[in-house]
Amino acid sequence: MTKKEYIAEIADSIDKLRLYEKELNITEYNETEKKIFWTICSTVAKFPKCNISDVINHSKLSRSTVYKTILLFEKNSLISLHRSGEDKRQHLITIITD
């Protein structure tokens, strides 16, 4: 694939991502918040469980930034948090799909 073809493919992917953001109603969030949302989506899709530490590790963002954003997402009904049955210190993240 040529460099021009890569650029065209990347542009197409960005357009699709922006469409998904609109459909998921996350366009009003800033880029850091969107990165956290996409990290949650990716983690939930790849692993059986997703907790706050997973999001911090995969996003490479600070604990405070991730935690504040997760609370915002929970308040806005994008995700839900619940305590792990195995480890009460752990909060598991579920994406609300309704």
Image: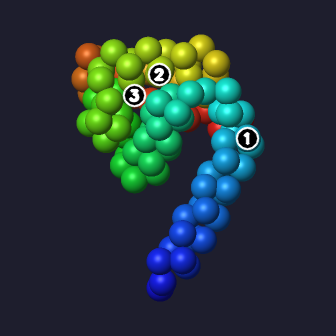
Q: Which residue is mark 2?
A: 70
Which x, y percent locates residue 92? 39, 28
**Which class describes the residues within 10 Å of circle 3: few (<14), some (14-19), or many (20+)?**
some
Residue 22's disc is 1
Name the residue: 32% across, 30% down.
Answer: 61
Residue 29, quarter of picture: top right
Q: Is residue 84 visible?
A: no
Amino acid at circle 1: Lys
Which sits in the foreground, 24 or 33? 33
Q: Distance of mark 3 from mark 2, alpha carbons?
A: 11 Å
Amino acid at circle 2: Ile
Front label number (1 vs 2): 1
Residue 12, quarter of picture: bottom right
Name the N-terminal-most of marks 1 and 3: 1
Front label number (1 vs 3): 1
Placement of 47 over or under 30, stated as above or below: below
Q: Distance of mark 1 from mark 2, alpha carbons?
A: 19 Å
Q: Distance of mark 1 from mark 3, alpha carbons?
A: 26 Å
Q: Residue furthest front?
A: 4
Looking at the rendered structure, the secondary structure element under dot 2 is helix
Left or right of residue 93, residue 97 in this image: right
Residue 92's disc is 3
> Which quarter shows the C terminus?
top right
Amino acid at circle 3: Leu
Looking at the rendered structure, the secondary structure element under dot 3 is strand
Which x, y percent locates residue 22? 73, 41
